[in-house]
Image (cartoon, rainbow, N blue to C red):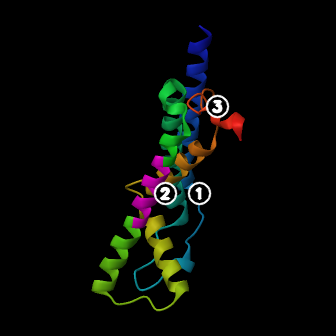
Amino acid sequence: MYRLAVILMIACLWGGLFFGALSIAKLDLGYLPIICGPWGCLAGLAPLLSVHSMWLVLLGGTLTLTRWVSPRLHSPRIWVVGTAIGFCSVLGLWIFQYIGFSSRDGQISSPEEALKFLSFHTLRCTDLPFIEFLLSTSVHSLIPWRGAGKDLDVNNASEA
């Protein structure tokens, strides 16, 4: 009975966070003209924040519940691998967008312009949650959970 109540409370909290994340889109936050360039300008700030926070709530909650249920996922190793996969996917997105931009429109001339370009394409990528996956797995790789140290070799640790 207690476990069912905890699961229901978590589901309600998760649903409330999900609803709150999607409700950000109704706010009038204006635009972010700092990132504009020859590649275009971003959509409104509120819809972007809404979609990115929705992905973060969805992935963060799913990964937390999965880690809570499965004892195999208590080790930080799998989360470090997930962080590496997330980093490689963000890096791949940047390379893909840069190759596409340089073949169409030209070169990026300064480091500030490169930062604007990468920020623009990172924030604009709302269909695939690369950044949110990277953040979620990074947080999980840093959090020690019960049973996380069981696979460590205790004999080598006591000799050091």
Q: Main secondary structure of the magenta part?
A: helix
Residue at figure coordinates x 37%, y 72% from the top left: 95
Which amino acid type is shown beneath numbered disc 2?
A: Ile
Q: CA distance from mark 2 to mark 1?
A: 23 Å
Residue at figure coordinates x 51%, y 41% from the top left: 77
Magenta span covers which residues?
81-91
Which mark identifies residue 52?
A: none
Residue at figure coordinates x 46%, y 48% from the top left: 81
The percent position of residue 56, horizontal first and vertical second, equals 52, 48
The percent position of residue 47, horizontal first and vertical second, equals 50, 59
Q: Give the vertical position of 116 relative to 16 (above or below).
A: below
Density class for disc 1 (Cα within 10 Å; few <14, some 14-19, many ≥20) is few
Q: Nearer the viewer, mark 2 or mark 1?
A: 2
Q: Give the vertical position of 99 relative to 110 (above or below).
A: above
Q: Earlier in the sequence, mark 3 or mark 2?
A: 2
Residue occupied by mark 3? 155
Q: Nearer the viewer, mark 3 or mark 2?
A: 3
Q: CA distance from mark 3 to mark 2?
A: 39 Å
The percent position of residue 31, horizontal first and vertical second, equals 55, 71
In the image, 29: left or right of 97? Answer: right
Q: Quadrant of residue 39?
A: bottom left
Magenta-span inclusion, residue 84: yes
How many numbered dots are placed on residues in this image? Answer: 3
Q: Earlier in the sequence, mark 2 or mark 1?
A: 1
Residue occupied by mark 2? 131
Secondary structure of the residue carrying numbered label 3: helix
